[in-house]
Image (cartoon, rainbow, N blue to C red):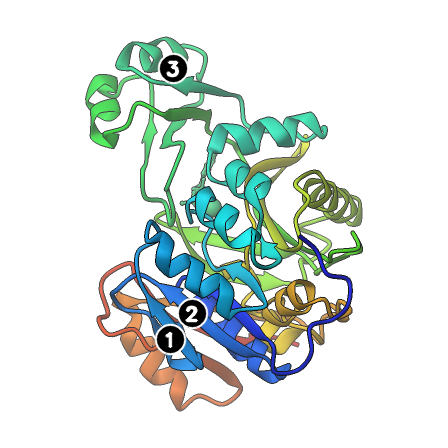
């Protein structure tokens, strides 16, 4: 279901999920004159503080989903692991972002890598793994080491284990507790780059400048953007932007699509996609004319897509639960934009806030 006319001021954007991405989307929606209704299971849900209505229910509560669908004018999801059925139910009521094709693909590591290959991207050499025997056989083809990942539900480096030939492979397989895994060759990259595109209901796309990302323990620590051409050449930038636009089109996505890649001597190597705002583009809140959150709201509510030009060079630092002292210091620093998420407990590895600062 698509609407080409913009939804009027005061219309209601439904957001599935109550975390920081939902919260920052809700703030952007408010700036554009929309109201927000958050649907989130019980638990910490900072996005609810910015909503005029909330539904606290599980994603399998079909009655709650139906009432939610009747109360909103369009819906987006702040995370890609919302069950596909949820979007099918809501699609009967309102335009949805992302729809089933994008969700199904982004929810499974083999599906997303297969699509990337189909559109001509390089991917790490990979094999599906459903037993310890599969793993032992596939490891024989990975002389430079590999990463075993669950195909579903991994995030922030969770659900993955790095392996060399000499590791106890049976123990590694058992540690993930899943028979739906992927083994990927370890890529020797010079840097990691991410791309973000917005696509509207008419199929118009707008790319953002790319980000260069630094991970620690599998979790994004820092992004610097727009990517330095010494790190990501203009050719690779154009290539990545063209590829992500093709992916968004193939998936029929209305909203925003992020893509993580490795920069190698062979070119860009695809890692994964997410059909939602992405941590590596939080710098766009102050750093681009239209932030990733505003752009998502624009795409979903049928407004024209905004200008994505960067206003300077930006660094975004994630504040995890173990970095609270750094956050404290940032509050009294000059020239740092502090974004706290309003979560109740600062646990190790939990994303609590991010800091944006202009470098030039
Ligand atoms: N095949 C690979 N080769 C080298 N590094 C990898 C590979 N896969 C993942 N990594 C590293 O681990 C990080 C997290 O892996 P990713 O697949 O993006 O999982 P998540 O869904 O947790 O973000 C990546 O950003 C990268 O730094
Ligand atoms: Mg990732």
Cα separation, mark 3 vs mark 2, equals 44 Å
Q: Is residue 199 above or below residue 101?
A: below
Q: Position of residue 261 (x, y in %)?
A: 59, 42
- In this orientation, which residue lies closer to the viewer: 108 or 187? 108
Circle 2 sits in a helix, a strand or a loop, which is it? strand
Q: Is residue 45 above or below residue 340?
A: above
Circle 3 sits in a helix, a strand or a loop, which is it? helix
> Quick check: marks 1 and 2 in contact, CB under 8 Å?
yes
Is residue 47 in sight in this rendering? yes
Cα separation, mark 1 vs mark 2, equals 6 Å
Q: Is residue 193 above or below residue 95?
A: above
Cβ of mark 2 under 8 Å from ligand 1: the answer is: no
Residue 139 — which label? 3
Residue in the image at 63% along x and 72% along y: 294
Crowd around label 1: few <14 · some 14–19 · many ≥20 (10 Å): many
Residue ID for mark 1: 48
Q: Position of residue 169 (x, y in %)?
A: 25, 19
Left or right: residue 275 compared with residue 120: left
Residue 71 — which label? none
Q: Position of residue 156 (x, y in %)?
A: 38, 50
Circle 1 sits in a helix, a strand or a loop, which is it? helix
Left or right: residue 156 compared with residue 204: left
Q: Nearer the viewer, mark 3 or mark 2?
A: 2
| Quarter of the rendering containing residue 344 | bottom left
Crowd around label 3: few <14 · some 14–19 · many ≥20 (10 Å): many
1 or 2: tag closer to the N-terminus: 2
Residue in the image at 69% along x and 72% along y: 7
Residue ID for mark 2: 38
**Image quarter hosting the C terminus:** bottom right
> Quick check: marks 1 and 3 in contact, CB under 8 Å?
no
């Amino acid at each position: 279901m698509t609407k080409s006319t913009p939804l009027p001021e005061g219309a209601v954007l439904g957001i599935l999920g109550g975390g920081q991405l939902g919260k920052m989307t809700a703030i952007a929606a408010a700036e554009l004159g929309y109201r927000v209704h958050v649907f989130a299971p019980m638990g910490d849900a900072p996005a609810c503080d910015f909503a005029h209505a909330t539904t606290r229910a599980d994603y399998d509560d079909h009655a709650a989903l139906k009432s939610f669908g009747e109360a909103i004018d369009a819906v987006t999801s702040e995370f890609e692991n919302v069950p596909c059925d949820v979007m099918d139910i809501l699609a009967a009521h309102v335009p949805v972002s992302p729809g089933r094709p994008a969700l199904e693909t982004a929810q499974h590591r083999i599906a997303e890598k297969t699509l990337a290959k189909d559109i001509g991207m390089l991917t790490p050499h990979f094999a599906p793994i459903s037993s310890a025997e599969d793993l032992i056989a596939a490891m024989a083809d990975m002389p430079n080491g590999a990463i075993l990942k669950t195909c579903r539900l991994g995030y922030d480096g969770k659900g993955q284990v790095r392996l060399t030939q000499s590791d106890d492979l049976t123990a590694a397989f058992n540690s993930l507790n899943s028979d739906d895994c992927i083994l990927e060759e370890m890529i020797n990259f010079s840097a990691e780059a991410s791309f973000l595109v917005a696509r509207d209901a008419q199929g118009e796309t707008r790319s953002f400048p790319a980000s260069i990302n630094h991970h620690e323990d599998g979790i994004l620590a820092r992004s610097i953007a727009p990517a330095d051409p010494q790190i990501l050449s203009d050719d690779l930038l154009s290539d990545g932007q063209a590829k992500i636009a093709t992916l968004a089109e193939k998936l029929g996505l209305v909203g925003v699509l992020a893509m993580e890649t490795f920069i190698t001597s062979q070119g860009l190597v695809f890692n994964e996609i997410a059909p939602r705002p992405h941590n590596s583009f939080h710098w766009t809140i102050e750093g681009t004319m239209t932030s990733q959150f505003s752009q998502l709201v624009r795409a979903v509510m049928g407004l024209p897509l905004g200008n994505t030009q960067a206003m300077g060079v930006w660094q975004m630092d994630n504040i995890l639960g173990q970095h609270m002292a750094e956050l404290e210091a940032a509050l009294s620093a000059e020239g740092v934009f502090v974004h706290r998420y309003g979560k109740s407990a600062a646990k190790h590895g939990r994303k609590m806030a991010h800091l944006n600062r202009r470098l030039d």
